[in-house]
Image (cartoon, grey):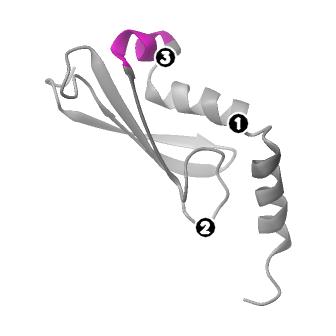
């Protein structure tokens, strides 16, 4: 286990999209963890803006979810039903005639 404040880097592959997940335990407060997700900016992803999502939560909650990768995967699965995300996927697949 890393020392307090150390960052762990992991990879999440969600529906073929490879993302980088960073976990920093005991960030400024004991028992508090900050998790960050970076997805490619040019592919629609249901979390965050332009492929970036940062979230803070208690370490116990993160452990119960199975870690940061599992936490983000479950969150992305839930948000993938959002009409805004579904519209972005359709637009991405169709492409832009003016680019």
User: Of helix, strand and loop, which one carries label 1?
Assistant: helix
Q: How crowded is mark 2: few (under 14 residues within 10 Å), some or many (20 or more)?
A: few
Rendering quarter of residue 78: top right
| Residue 35 to residue 15: above or below | above
Left of 80 or right of it: where is 69? left
| Residue 99 to residue 96: above or below | below
Q: Mark 1 points at which residue?
A: 79
Q: Residues within 10 Å of mark 3 (few under 14, many from 20)?
A: few
User: Of helix, strand and loop, which one carries label 3?
Assistant: loop
Q: Quadrant of the N terminus?
A: top left
Which numbered dot is residue 66?
Answer: 3
Foreground: disc 1 or disc 2 = 1
In-front residue for pair 66/46: 46
Rendering quarter of residue 92: bottom right
User: Of helix, strand and loop, which one carries label 2?
Assistant: loop
Q: In x, y percent, where is residue 35?
A: 38, 34
Q: Which sits earlier in the primary sequence, circle 3 or circle 1?
A: 3
Tell me, yes or no, whether the highlighted magenta stretch contains residue 29.
Answer: no
Foreground: disc 2 or disc 3 = 2
Residue drawn 18% across the image and 27% down it: 28
Q: How crowded is mark 1: few (under 14 residues within 10 Å), some or many (20 or more)?
A: some
Direction bottom: furthest residue: 98
Which numbered dot is residue 42?
Answer: 2
- Start and end of the magenta stretch? 58-64
Q: In x, y percent, where is residue 86?
A: 81, 50
Q: Which sits earlier in the primary sequence, circle 2 or circle 3?
A: 2
Q: In x, y percent, where is residue 59?
A: 35, 15
Q: Which sits earlier in the primary sequence, circle 1 or circle 2?
A: 2
């Amino acid at each position: 286990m890393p020392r307090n404040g150390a960052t762990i880097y992991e990879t999440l592959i969600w529906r073929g999209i490879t993302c980088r997940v960073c976990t920093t335990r005991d960030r400024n407060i004991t028992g508090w963890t900050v998790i960050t997700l970076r997805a490619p900016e040019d592919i629609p992803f249901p979390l965050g803006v332009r492929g970036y999502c940062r979230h803070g939560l208690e370490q116990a909650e993160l452990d119960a979810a199975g870690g940061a990768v599992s936490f983000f995967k479950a969150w992305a699965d839930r948000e993938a039903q959002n009409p805004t995300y579904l519209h972005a996927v359709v637009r991405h697949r169709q492409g832009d005639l003016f680019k």
